[in-house]
Amino acid sequence: MTEFATLSIAAAAKLIRNRDISPIEYTQALLDRVSAHDAKINAFIRIMPEEALAEARTAETEIAAGNWRGPLHGVPYALKDIVDVDGVPTTCHSKIMADNVATADAEVTRRLKAAGGVLIGKTSTHEFAIGGPSFDLPWPPARNPWNPDHFTGGSSSGSGAALAAGFVPAAIGTDTGGSVRNPASFCGIVGMKATYGRVSRRGVFPLSFSLDHVGPMTRGVEDNAIMMNAIAGHDAADPGSAPVESLDFTSLLGRDIQGMRIGVIRHFYNRDHVADPEMGQGIERAIDVLRGLGAEISEIELSPLREYAAANRVILLSEAFAIHEKWFKERPQDYGELARKRIIGGAFIRAADYVNATRTKTRLVAELADKMRDIDVAVTASSMDPPNRLDDPDGLEANYGRQARAPFNLTGVPAIAVPTGLSNSGLPLSMQIVGKPFDEARVYQVAHAYEQATGFGAQIPNLD
């Protein structure tokens, strides 16, 4: 089981294509690992062993016949449980949706099925991707495999936990204010929020139409780019989908970053919020690594983080309440306490505040574009702190504000969270690499160069 638990997508693809391992044995080994360990992690709401093994058998038959679909063929993955799978419940981790059965695949599900992936289950999330780690819901919150007393980050909490625990090599999350990159930061994995519109959101329960993104989560950068190749592309049925040309997101991996211009948004984590010393030191060491790889480092200054965060929050809560208003009138008692408290805030935001937030968004999009004109990528914090304890409600609440992810939901540019090592207490540290619109390949190039130079991201914790 341990060998399968640590396999990357890239390595597994070679073994499967050469028929050195079977998709069936791979899937069964990961299902066995979930069975042995998930009771203390709670990464999954629903395990689908029969369906997964049937998909694995189909993949094995196709590959034996010479019909290899690509690097995800026969590789297990998981979906955050706000993503539809035809005939399978999409619960959004909520009593309100407990009996909701999807009648069609989400577009991202369809693309992963077309790539030959093997779905082994639906992962835990915050209620409706906003509630937080709650204990008053039908399912318990996910726990951090590095230390189960600690938070996974959210809202793609189960996806992050499943990857860190070695349950799957690939998972899908969603990101409205940082919900792919927060669990990536806290679980020591890689999470990419691509450019707004790069990945279809059709068939994914919405939180905020203006800010929602679907993103790949993996243990390594190459695997993340492989996942992005499978899920990216224009979808005319998603009004927010961008009609841009598809490309190979792995195309720049392995190229050096000599002479690349990297801007550091240092004030986000040493002035706007003062990061935990270990988190800040991890970012500074990462900048030194990038400099040592030949990158030209400069510092850039943006508007204060609070301006980005405030505009993001007003838009998010306004749109979230519009989505939930009917249920709030009819069955407010069926929400968990955290989701109810957060969503209800949108009911008290004035139309003028929403309009002004969208105007602020336009100004900040232009500001970021101007500041990035003379650089290739930017580096900054993702989370300001290592993972909080689950029994520390004040720390958990503070976590949602002490981050630098929301600016890149607001502006829609690509941003990836990557590990920078472990704290003295053995908890993950991280940073964020930010790119220009639709320049994900460049972001992956820098992230991969850093990963190769440090080796961070390859390890998983001991669950025994």
Image (cartoon, helix red, strand yellow):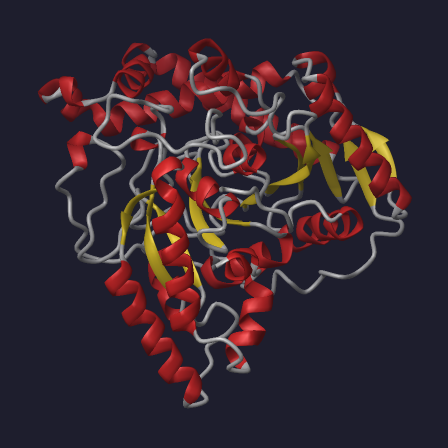
Please tell me which residue lies in front, 121 or 443: 121
Task: State whether residue 184 is above or below residue 238.
Answer: above
Point out residue 69 in the picture as x, y percentages from the top left corner.
46, 77
Provide residue 428's location: percent of width, then percent of height. 62, 33
Q: How far across and down, in percent of the image, does residue 301 sit? A: 75, 23
- The residue that appears at 60% across and 24% down in the rendered structure is 386
Above or below: residue 335 compared with residue 274: below
Residue 65 location in percent, x, y?
41, 90
180 and 414: which is toward the camera: 180
* Residue ID at (49%, 39%): 180
Q: Is residue 242 visible?
A: no
Kindly indicate the quadrant of the structure image that contains residue 374.
top right
In the image, taking residue 6 as reference, residue 62 lies left or right, namely left
Q: Quadrant of residue 297?
A: top right
Q: Is residue 56 left or right of residue 182?
A: left
Q: Considering depth in this image, is 354 or 118 the residue closer to the camera? A: 118
Identify the residue at the far left of this view.
330
Furthest-front residue in this view? 464
